[in-house]
Amino acid sequence: MDLSQVIRNVADFPSKGILFRDVTPLLARPEALREACERMVAPFRDARIDRVLAIESRGFLFGAPMALMLGAGFVPLRKPGKLPCATLREAYTLEYGEAALEVHADAVAPGQRVLLVDDVLATGGTLAAAGSLAGRLGAEVAGAAVLIELEGLRGRARLPGLRVESVLRY
Ligand code: AMP
């Protein structure tokens, strides 16, 4: 299946100059969602992943089924103020604004192997923050899986030492 056919490109959203990659048509087709998740987990099948760390909010949509496929636990990396217990926080810059991520301080045991998951890799700030949180938790970061990589924004350059696997590249 050509997954690029179920990604909708929306110009000037959420702000002028941004070409937004809308995954809702993909999510609406069960065979497309399944194939997207299967292709995102494939490079990490043998990576002994203990926890999938997925980024709010679209990362959750792929990360939870991927955790089931890998037999791993699911850990949400959330926007500030959403998690009820003690958290670690990491601030970063987004393609279109400022943001921060939080994780429960007890979500990962030191030495556990984690996979970072998001829908889109743009400038890399979000995944860098996620990797930093994972590192602060003492996790071993096996890599990052994204559905879409916007190669022109050179996000990989901001993620030295991180294994990044993408399904679709633009
Ligand atoms: P970045 O930190 O620049 O790599 O941005 C990645 C995050 O922003 C991901 O969580 C994406 O969901 C979102 N994002 C950034 N750019 C886009 C885009 N062009 N289309 C859809 N989502 C985007």
Image (cartoon, grey):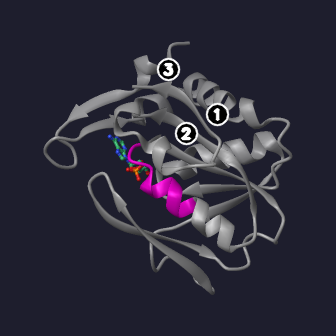
Residue 15, above or below 134 = above
Q: Marks 1 and 3: which is nearer the front? A: 1
Q: Depth check: 152 or 6 in front?
A: 152
Q: Earlier in the sequence, mark 1 or mark 3?
A: 3
Q: Whole-percent x and y of residue 85?
A: 63, 85
Q: Residues within 10 Å of mark 1 (few under 14, many from 20)?
A: many
- The image's mark for residue 40 is 1
Q: Quadrant of the N terminus?
A: top right
Mark 3, residue position: 3
Residue under the image location 73 percent in, 48 percent down: 67
The magenta span reads: 122-130
Query: Residue 68's mark?
Result: none
Residue type at tag 2 = Val
Contact, mark 2 vs mark 1 (Cβ under 8 Å): yes
**In the rendered image, which quarter is residue 24 located in?**
top left
Q: Is residue 157 left or right of residue 43?
A: left
Q: Nearer the viewer, residue 131 or 67?
A: 131
Q: Is residue 127 magenta?
A: yes
The residues tagged by marks 1 and 3 sit, at their Cα atoms, a distance apart of 12 Å
Residue 138 in the image: state x and y as whole percent. Answer: 75, 71
Label 3 beta carbon within 8 A of ligand 1 = no
The label shown at residue 146 is 2
